[in-house]
Image: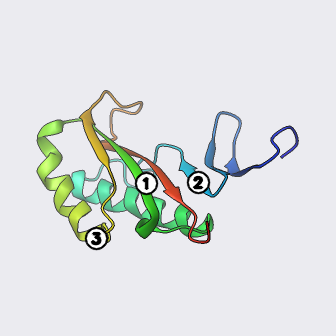
Amino acid sequence: MAGDPGIERLHVGKRLSEVAIAGGTVYLAGQVPENEPEADIEGQTREVLGHIDRLLLESGSSKQHLLSVQIYLKDITEIGRMNAVWDAWVAPGHTPPRATVQAALADPRWRIEVVVVARQASA
């Protein structure tokens, strides 16, 4: 994109890009449940992790290359149920540094938002 030497952006919108890639590092925007906003925490977590898988693959990365993850939960008491889905998804031996906090999310139907930083597989 003009004006951004060395930065590649994917799925560029008026307000945000879903992905920015610079120097072999992949930065994802906060991923939220777009298709099933009424689902329970397990369903929303599975959907969000699917978005992450898709965007990482498109960016030349994968969950084996996660550098950092921030998880925002509407209700922190759901962390155990979210963790059950996370534990089944995350690559054994490649668990990233992670923070999980309770937050007021932009859409009251959302139970989770996840922000990821990863390394490109070829970097």
Q: Of marks 3 and 1, which one's residue comes earlier in the chain?
A: 1
Residue type indicated by callout 1: Leu
Which one is nearer the viewer's eye here, 48 or 57?
57
Alpha carbons under labels 3 and 1: distance apart: 13 Å
Q: How is the image coloured?
A: rainbow
- Nearest the viewer among 106 and 102 is 102
Based on the displayed image, in which of its 4 quarters is residue 24 positioned? bottom right
Q: Which residue is mark 1?
A: 67
2 or 3: tag closer to the N-terminus? 2
Residue indicated by mark 3: 93
Horizontally, residue 89 falls left or right of residue 9, namely: left
The reply to whether callout 3 and callout 1 are in contact (CB within 8 Å) is no
Q: Which mark is residue 56?
A: none
Amino acid under disc 2: Thr
Q: Is residue 7 above or below residue 75?
A: below
Helix, strand or loop for disc 3: loop
In percent of width and height, residue 1 lies at 83, 46
| In the displayed structure image, the side of residue 106 where residue 54 appears, left or right | right
**Residue that numbered label 2 is attached to:** 25
Q: Residues within 10 Å of mark 3 (few under 14, many from 20)?
A: few
Q: Secondary structure at mark 2?
A: strand
Q: Position of residue 93 (x, y in %)?
A: 28, 70
Dot 2 alpha-carbon crowd within 10 angstroms: few under 14, some 14 to 19, many 20 or more: many
- Give left or right: position of 107 versus 119: left
Where residue 75 sits, quadrant-wise, is: top left
What residue is drawn where x is 31% and y is 27%? 104
Give, as a three-letter code, the residue at label 3.
Gly
Marks 2 & 1, CB-CB < 8 Å contact:
yes
> Whole-Å distance between the Cαs marked 2 and 3?
20 Å
